[in-house]
Amino acid sequence: MGLIEKFLHNLKAPHWGVHPDDHKRPAADAPIRVLPLPARLYVPLQQHVGQAARPIVLVGQKVLKGQLIGEPQGRISAPVHAPTSGTITAIGDITAPHASGLPFDAITITSDGLDQAIEVDVPADPFALSPTEITNLIAAAGIVGLGGATFPASVKMALGKRSEITTLIVNGGECEPYLSCDDRVMRDHAADVVDGVRLMMYGMGAKEALVGIEDNKPEAIAAMRKAASHFPKVKIRPVPARYPMGSDRQLIQTLTGKEVPSDCRAADVGVIVNNVNTAYCVHRALRFGEPLIRRIVTINGGAVWQPGNLMVPIGTLAADLFEFVGLKSEPARLVMGGPMMGTVISHANIPVVKGTSGFLALSEEEIPHSEAGPCIRCGNCTSVCPIGLLPLEMAARVRAGDLDGASTMGLSDCISCGCCSYICPSHIPLVQYFSHAKGDLWAQERSKLKMEAAKKLAVDRAARLEREAKEKAEAAARRKAERDAAKAAEAAAKAAAAATESTATTTETVS
Amino acid sequence: MSKLDELRDRLFYQPLSLGLIALATSAALSFANQSTQEGIADAEKRDLQTSLSEVLPAGHGDNDLLKDTVTVADNDGKEVTIYRSRKAGTVNGVVFKTAARGYAGDIVVLIGLDEKGTMLGARVIKHQETPGLGDKIEVAKSKWIHDFEGKSLDNLPAEKWAVKKDGGVFDQFAGATITPRAVVKAVKQGLDFYAGHREEILSAPTQGEAK
Amino acid sequence: MIPVLPASAPATAPHTVTGSSVTRIMLILLATLVPATVYGFWLYGWPSIFLWIVTVLSALLGEAACLKMAGRRAMPSLLDGSALVTGWLLALSLPPWAPWWIGCIGGLFATILAKQVFGGLGYNLFNPAMVARVFLLISFPVQMTIWIAPMPITAPAALNFHDGLLVFIRGIPDLDAVTSASLLGFAKTELSRGIDLFHSLAASTAPVTTFSGNRTGSLGETAALLIAAGGLVLMAFRIISWHIPVAMLAGIAIPALIFNSIDPARYLDVSAHLLSGAAMLGAFYIATDYVTSPNTKYGQLVFGFGCGFLTYVIRTWGGYPEGVAFAVLLMNAVTPVIDRYLKPRILGRDWRGAPLDPAIEKAKS
Amino acid sequence: MLAAVTSLTALGAILGCGLGVAARKFAVEGDPLADEIEAMMPGSNCGQCGMAGCSAVAKAIAEGSATVTICPPGGKALATALAAKLGISVDLGDVVDSGPQIAQVKEEICIGCCRCMKACPTDAVVGAAKQIHNVIREACTGCGSCVERCPTEAITLRPVPVTLQHWVWPKPEIEAEA
Amino acid sequence: MNIREIMKNGLWDQNIVFAQVLGMCPTMAVTTSGTNGLGMGLATTAVLVGSNMIISSIRNFVSPQVRIPVYIVLIATLVTIVDMVLNAWMHDLYRVLGLFIALIVVNCAVLGRAESFASKSGIVASAFDGLFMGLGFTLALTAIGLIRELIGMGTLFSQASLLLGPKFAFLEMTVIPNYGGVLMMILPPAGFLVLGLMLAVKRFYELRAAAKETAKTTASPTPLAEGAIGCH
């Protein structure tokens, strides 16, 4: 690029965000490889936002590929399907792909090697179905947002239908360095992605679809343009490559100029964002009846021999993936997701879930080592924050324990993109401060709710005790009254009897 | 005690007590004022006399300077109080204040002249110059102010009434030129004033004790 | 092969490196100061070199002593280069032939009382170099206002190493022979005598504003253009943004332009103001100090303009001929206020922090 | 002189009058602080503090006769909040805080005597005579009233288990700050 | 409260300047030299003793509603009378102290003692409280003044003979001859600077004392432990 061009390019680029070294190639240029079927798969029941699925299989039961093994519970949830055929050998704990390293429930399937699929009915022409039927099929296929948010796709579509969506934004931003699973699906399956986009548009009643692709993926842009050339409603829109362009609020603003109000969802401004891989899965589900049981996962990092993208069944352990691509050296850090927002995992016995975009095995040179120093108030974090927050001020408040102060500065608006931590010359773990504060505030909120509930219970109990005491007293009084009445009646009877005797005589006498 | 407590909460008690205290204190103050008035006046008179005598050589006059004053308007119409020193009834010296703008506010100089207009002495009596830099004009800090003694408009031409940097005869201080310049200017102004109103000053009848 | 890593506290994202660090920032900053400093050395000879060395070493010593007292490891904090920067900037703002103890006291004061007492790097409210300079100026007005006419080190009349050392330790022997006045000081003195600028600047002894910078002043004043060039390099490296320097120079230039056009006999012109004194050093290196300037772009514009405007006010109507140090310190004091009120707008919220109206956003297309 | 004395005396009298009236007019009644503090207390009236219910404790804290660390179920979090409310600094080093706790019934020991059930201020223990009791996690405040009542020591307090949903990122520790 | 405790409070624990940080106006204004600090301190002590005694003696008759104006009027009167008396009959001393005396009225420490001690205590205790609070104030002002004077002008107790009489001329000394002076030190900002540093020193000393105290209490079982080690 010439100097002037570069200058103009800089001028046009958004004023937020950072531009980390993307490390995407050569992994992005290698075609997708299919992972040989692993012997065991660990399918977690909670692979989505919302309530975990409920297992509907028993240990020892045989299942077929695509068979429902966990059904959704509650309003926001998603089903889980068997990624291959085999036997259920366990239902229990496995380490979650989460920074805490805590376990969660998963169904273990020992593969029978046949990979035999269950019979399904495939609609001849999905566009002949009603939008609601499309949504139901997507829900049944267990499709969730594959960009990492893992919000159930059907719930999102239903939400969109309620608030008159005009635009479907398809997120091909993939701004995280190292990752290329979105790039790859657009290059290799452009027509399928476009088909999925059209199906989603139809399902939610959107008038147009904008596919935002960062301009550092020219091949993907070209492939998608070609695939979408017959469909004028599907527009391919290159966007400047800048982290975090793949964040929905940023992408919406760049593509439509709309800002999502901080207390609203994207749907409230008539927009819904879905990932390109989600679109691909929608296509697979509606055209082939294949539920979400496999996905493209990027394996990358300095410690990897053959970085690239793999088509992987859900539930495969990261260890199997690393074994397949081979490791050059002992990795210094294992990360699930991209390097900017991904979570570090303490070991590789962690299953691929629906939201896993990649695993990184980073070498010693690639990871930060510096100790955190004092803040020099350089303001870099402020200038890169895509939300317009003041990370240094918020972190100072969190450090001082003033969580309320941090909240009033907009802690809840923070998207944890990591730009501030990345740019900080003092290497202050700003995002960790914010994650800590958000978690702590949430815990406080929860304990407050619990305290209120407990207070109500205590009041109810006091009322109950009082009522019981009163009832007891009443009962006692009643019994006493009854007894008295009985006694009185008895006495009366006696008296009456006596009287009768006498009256009888009198009556007799009277009569 | 409990009766006092009860009393203290009554509404009339507060104005009464505060009023009594005010009465007592103001009475004490007026008593103190009356008994010290004379002493204070004496002391202040002594103070003025002391500073006046500093700019006149000892035994220059034999009268009470404070009782022989004359007020003359200068060229700007401002009244200047002049104290006259007499020897055997004849005026042989005058003392008055003159001022010029220094580095930070006015510098007031008290100057003493003989009847011919030759400097007998000068003292800076009020200034706000930077301590350590411009305060060398104080007699306590430096002997510089004595340079004026014996000089007059006759024995020093007008252009020489300046600091050395401006071609005059008076020293400036390192780092501070404005302050000595202002003092020289003030003294020169005083001499000019005396030269212009000499007859008036010497012949006017005394106006008695300065207020 | 299943790699198993030790389970400890989770490392936090991001897991990738920038290469940016405090040390790197400070080193680039120092590198851009080198040309101006070397040019100053050439103009003022050995005494200025000694003064520079003593000032920088004192600043480092003060920092190290405080860190030791606080029970911290001195090395990592010393290596961040911030004390070096403080000492260096202070040295650039001193009269080049000031005696050794000026540099010594200044350096120690800057790092101990202006920085470490507040809690060290990142916690000081005021720019340490300028606090030290103001302290020196008020405490030792004589030594701090003796300026030397430039005499290139290669000139035959220049002092050799030995004589330079003597001047540095014992003071300047023949003061009147070498002293000169800085342009701002000269103009101010002459104006106070009632001589207007036309006459005073036309006089043969008057210092002139030349772009080569060959004139009386501190190291940072004479080399104003080299300083500005260094500042541009800093901008290119994105170590400083343009906001503060441009706003500060505008803050000086705009009133200078107005008053100079009203009465050129009483008010110096724009170029004299911009190239004299510490205007350039202040705009590019002093006011842009991260710790003591606002964090947001809007805040930086206000801050910079305030620095410039106050500088002009102090130079023109104040008690001292040069006002950059005072102006920067005054604006440092209001930095927290600026930061409090000039915040960036949060995405999805209006300027007051209330969420935007979804209906309006929805209507946009 | 007389004028000065008289005027000063009159001024004193007038001001004294004004102050006396003002003191009556702006007299503060009641204690809103106690109510605010009561709202912060757990409200289960468990009695572990030795006082008669949470409102009594709140009054005592507002008056200063009880310390902010008096409430065991409130723990360190409540003590910190109360200290902030009252604007006092408190050394919380002595407060034993094992974090939030809940009661747990050891099923193999429980004899189903129902004593704990009756003691629970929030009705968090469910069960029937001669049946193994159970604790409803959401309702238990961890006050420990039941623990003392259990004749077989089948009820114990244990920290609320950390789950994936409850885990919170630890606060970063910066070495340079120490 | 015994006199010992009153003394300790006044001189150190609740020192007006170093612990309560009251009376900052006179502290900053007059501590340019040791002599000035001493003079101001002594004048304040006199007023403190007087005001404490008067207020203590009328404490039962003053209702709480009007107590503040009563105290202020009394203190102001006392100060004014002292001012007049000094001016009339001790004029030389007045020329040194005159400037400071009016400042005593605005010294909130005087009102503070009236409110917090004299209004609740007996006359004798109040007199001693005034005395030791005043002496503590004197001590602090003199110390600050001496430091500022030493660094600022290189002298100690200059002009002490004017304040205390010619017999005290021996106090006046020039520590550093031909000293150029650090001008900043005799300007108001340095008052804050020196006060701040002295507060830090006091705090440092107290923290160290507290640390020693805790070390002593926790260290008491160590001989046993050492003995146990010796057994090995």
Image: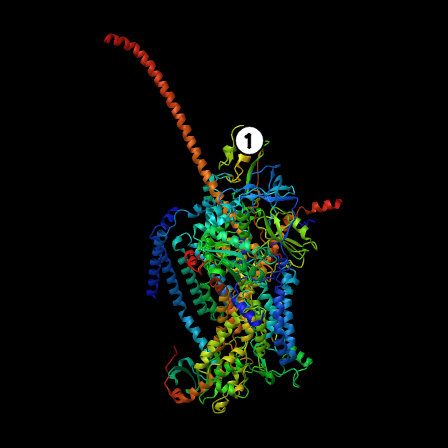
Q: List the single residue furthest toward the left.
A: A510
What secondary structure is marked by label 1?
loop
Residue under the image location 46 percent in, 66 percent down: E101
Q: Residues within 10 Å of mark 1 (few under 14, many from 20)?
A: some
Residue under the image location 62 percent in, 76 percent down: C35
Q: List the single residue furthest toward the right.
A: E232
* Front residue of this view, candidates D55 and B190: D55
* Chain of the residue that carries numbered disc 1 in the rendered image: D
Answer with left or right where residue A83 lies relative to residue B49.
right
Describe the colour scheme in one phrase: rainbow
Answer with left or right where residue C64 lies relative to residue B113.
right
Please say whether residue B210 is visible from this viewpoint: yes
Image: C213 above or below A404: below
Residue D82: horizontal and vertical position, in percent? 49, 48
* Front residue of this view, candidates D88 and B22: D88
Q: List the single residue furthest toward the front.
A: A124
Give the labeled residue for mark 1. Answer: D132
* Front residue of this view, candidates A105 and A138: A138
The type of residue carrying mark 1 is Ile
Q: Quadrant of residue E140?
A: bottom right
* Front residue of this view, candidates C81 and A40: A40
Quarter holding the N terminus of chain A?
bottom right
Residue A369: horizontal and vertical position, in percent? 65, 58
Quarter holding the C terminus of chain A?
top left
Residue A207: horizontal and vertical position, in percent? 45, 55
Image: C118 above or below B71: above
